[in-house]
Image (spheres, rainbow, N blue to C red):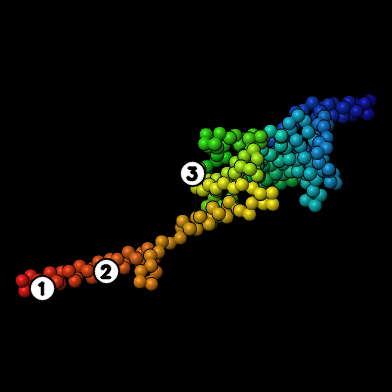
Amino acid sequence: MKKSILINIIILFCFTCKAQEFNLHNMKYFNEEFFIDWEVNRQYVPIGDDKYFKKGNRRIQLLYDYNDNEVRIEESDTITPYTRWATYNLETKIQTTIGQSFFNIDYGIWRFYSKIGKLEREINQDENYKFSIRQLIEKVKKEYHINLELKEERGYVSRFNENGKYYYHLILFPKDIYDEPTQHIMIDGQTGKNLFKTDIIHKRGGSGRDPVYEFLESLKEKNKPKTTTFNGKTYTEEEWKAFEQEQWEKYQAKRNKKGFFDWLFG
């Protein structure tokens, strides 16, 4: 009797897992049975116990890391550049990390839990970007008529920082990158203002140009102190102002002195 009840419970459990629609944010405990009705994605060759699944446009990767005693689930799709992922402790099966990315940009709130599910910390990946990814998407739609949320529209974006400044690097690909220029636009991560633009026609052996490097060099040139050279000596902007003032005062002194003697001797 007990054995029969146990079998029925197991069958019911498996049926429930199969019937449930997979939702990574709601999956607080790892269970591979969630993917029992998913098709194996043979686009990838699994290494070790890793597994790859697909259902419609959705894609799942199960990546096992026995050194860290965890499994990582990555969820993506063939239409958008969004990726959602979570890690689970293999001992307790409890979710230990959850986050998301847009292209290769980590964004939003990432949460980290202990192996028993206690929240330990949160990281706001957008803390240094007042101009949000959503605002960037709308800007690109308005100014360039490209939807970054659709892979087929040939846009790409990344983020980087230099000397405490934060930027987006927007890339707009033509239909043929070897015949038409690819646009590279650097955008202020705080204001959304376009700061730099360059076009590159790619060569099959590589273009030999780095648009980010060109942008940073342009900033150095722009921020370079203004100098003036006079009689073989170079003055900074402040030094030149002081020199001009000094020459003006000397000129005025000579003029006043000459004017006094002209008046005195008529």
Of badges 3 and 1, nearer the viewer stands: 1
Left or right, residue 58 beside residue 109:
right
- Residue 212 in the image: state x and y as whole percent: 58, 52
Q: Residue at x 66, y 49 (%)?
A: 203
Q: Which mark is residue 247?
A: 2
Q: Quadrant of the C terminus?
A: bottom left
CA separation in Å, label 2 and label 3: 42 Å
Q: Which mark is residue 261?
A: 1
Left or right, residue 255 beside residue 108:
left
Q: Is residue 165 above or below residue 244?
A: above
User: Residue 25 sits in which quadrant?
Assistant: top right
Disc 3 and disc 1 in contact, CB within 8 angstroms: no
- Residue 186 visible, this angle: no
Q: Which mark is residue 193?
A: 3
Q: Secondary structure at mark 1?
A: helix
Q: Residue furthest left?
A: 266
- Residue 41 visible, this angle: yes
Q: Secondary structure at mark 3?
A: loop
- Residue 13 in the image: state x and y as whole percent: 83, 29
Disc 1 and disc 2 in contact, CB within 8 angstroms: no
Classed neighbour count for the residue bearing mark 1: other residues with Cα under 10 Å, few (<14), some (14–19), many (≥20): few
CA separation in Å, label 1 and label 2: 21 Å
Left or right, residue 94 beside residue 152:
right
- Residue 96 in the image: state x and y as whole percent: 72, 44
